[in-house]
Amino acid sequence: MLISFKSSGASDVMMFGEVAAHMLEIMGKDPAAKRGVITVEQLPAAIEKLRAATTADKAQPAAMDDENESRGAAVKVSLTQRAIPLIELLNRASRESEPVIWEG
């Protein structure tokens, strides 16, 4: 399943369900929800939580994620690489005082 994060005036960010659920959990949102909103007031905290998670991720040794490991792929995709597009969307939404919605 794909989850789309959207905000007016910015390109959508799409993620696989498990990845999106992890990002939502980091931001303090219900990862089981099929749809939701990050309000303008919640954006600064959501951005900070994702940034803190990426900082912690960078301090960890690189590990292959389950998806790549099950396919036998040698590509490693870090939490940081997955979070950057979402952080950029949240930043833009915050600058424009627009909420971010997600649905899948």
Image (cartoon, rainbow, N blue to C red):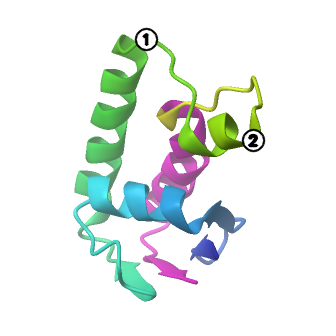
Residue 75 inside the magenta-drawn segment: no
Residue 51 in picture, x, y percent from top left: 35, 36
* Quadrant in the rendering for residue 61: top left
Q: Nearer the viewer, residue 96 or 56?
A: 56
Secondary element at tag 2: helix
Please report the residue visible at 37 percent of the width from the left and 84 percent of the height from the top.
33
Q: Which residue is mark 1?
A: 61
- Say what secondary structure mark 1 lies in: loop
Relative vertical location of residue 63 with respect to residue 72 in this rendering, above or below: above
The disc, 1 or 2, on the residue closer to the chain's N-terminal end is 1
Q: In the figure, residue 13 lies in which quadrant?
A: bottom right
Looking at the rendering, the stretch of residues picked out in magenta corresponds to 80-104
Q: Is residue 89 left or right of residue 48?
A: right
Q: Say which of 59 and 85 sits in front.
A: 59
Cα separation, mark 1 vs mark 2, equals 21 Å
Quadrant position of the N terminus in the picture: bottom right
Q: Residue 47: horizontal and vertical position, in percent?
A: 35, 49
Front position among marks 1 and 2: 2
Residue drawn where x is 62% and y is 74% of the image = 4
Residue at the location (56% across, 48% down)? 88
Residue hosting label 2: 71
Image coords of residue 27 (percent x, y): 29, 58
Query: What is the crowding at mark 2: few (fewer than 14 residues within 10 Å), some, or many (at least 20)?
Result: few
Our reading of the magenta stretch's main secondary structure is helix
Which quarter of the figure is the C terminus placed in? Answer: bottom right
Q: Is residue 84 left or right of residue 36?
A: right
Q: Is residue 70 above or below residue 13?
A: above
Q: Residues within 10 Å of mark 1 (few under 14, many from 20)?
A: few
